[in-house]
Image (cartoon, rainbow, N blue to C red):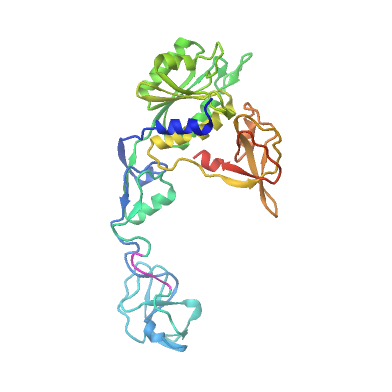
Amino acid sequence: MMSVDEALELMLARARPLEETEQVPLNDALGRVLARAERSPIDVPGFANSSMDGYAIRASDAALDGPVSLRLTQRIAAGEIGAGLSSGEAARIFTGAPLPDGADTVVIQEDCREDGGVVHFRGPAVPGDNVRPRGNDILAGSEILAAGTRLRPQELGLAASVGLARLDVVRRLRVAIFSSGDELVQPGEPLFAGAIYNSNRYTLGGLLSGLGCEIVDLGRVEDTLEATEAALVAAARDADVVVSSGGMSVGEEDHVKRALERTGRLEMWRVAVRPGKPLAYGRIGAADFIGLPGNPVSTLVTFCLFVRPFLLRRHGVASVQPSALRVPAAFAWPHPGRRREYVRARLERSADEITVAIYPKQGSDVLTSTVWADGLVEIREGKTIEPGERVPYYAFSQLLS
């Protein structure tokens, strides 16, 4: 069996970034991957402006320690352009408003008193106080977004702040999914004896939607070698990546591995991970194939660990690995395992500290554990854990987005 690190390295090495791009309006760019670096055509801000409500002055008029009185000549709100400011004058100014010519400082309103058209405050004033200079945030021509950036709301806001209405993004990856198993029934239909509802179809659909993929849903495939081969060929013809769940073991009713070997090539099978050992990677023509185990928790965990970084890399994202927090364990793990384990876990907060607890049932069929949990704790091969020992914790907020 391959280790987790070896399997991930192999898959990422084979993740060919998409080359096709498209241009989309900002409103449609959330979650997309930027195809080329973007530079700002303007300075931001494009003019010196006040960072506070107060009074714009010349600092030279208030250079000495002591009381200062200046004649109030104008009022400037955001979006207005004031007249030039002469020595001995002050302008009432509001946050974001452009400084008038001649002014170089803003005295905040809390430090001032206005009386009969004169503003009073105490000096000295420091040049540049409470002023945002032109280009304080962004200089024209500077790179604001790197190629390969996955666009979050803040990236969209940054693009909008320099006037970009459309962005060049990598086209959406087309991912075909199907579930293997005659025992699978669609939600809403009656269960026959021995049947179960097909939860993996909806787990995978949600996971892929969260990554911005275009989904080709092939539903359930019959447990025959012929049907599985036909599904693989059809999926590979319509998609960039094919992801299956179930049928990856070596039983007489598990056909996916054999079907892949007959229609394409198998490059990886079985990984030393719990849950999720029967994990496969291969190719069918130009399409990648990833075979996930059928147990619902195994499907979710192996997607987070292997499929998510693979799909992000194919989208052109540079940084695809989640970062772990090291959190004190609120549990014991006395028995070392031969495989790397990812246990469903949840942060718990007390007055003194944050610890991480694990769900009492860690079976790969216990889908309720994934709803209770807010992340996964990684337990390395051969490792035991004592309460209070810091362990690597990966939040679902990273693993599912």
Up/down of 321 relative to 216, above or below: below
- Image-quadrant location for residue 163: bottom left
Q: From the top left corner, tell me how far across and down residue 288 is, in percent.
A: 40, 26
User: Which residue is painted at 45% across and 37% down in the image?
Assistant: 211
Q: Which stretch is magenta? A: 130-135
Main SS of the magenta segment?
Answer: loop
User: Which residue is painted at 51% across and 38% down in the image?
Assistant: 400
- From the viewer's side, name the closer residue of 77 and 241: 241
Q: From the top left corner, tell me how far across and down residue 115 is, in percent.
A: 46, 86
- Counting every numbered tag in the picture gives 0
- Image-quadrant location for residue 137: bottom left
Residue 96 visible here: yes
Q: From the top left corner, tell me how far across and down residue 30 is, in percent.
A: 41, 44
Assess whether residue 131 is covered by the magenta stretch. yes
Q: From the top left corner, tell me how far across and down residue 238 is, in percent.
A: 36, 23
In screen coordinates, is 334 left or right of 109? right
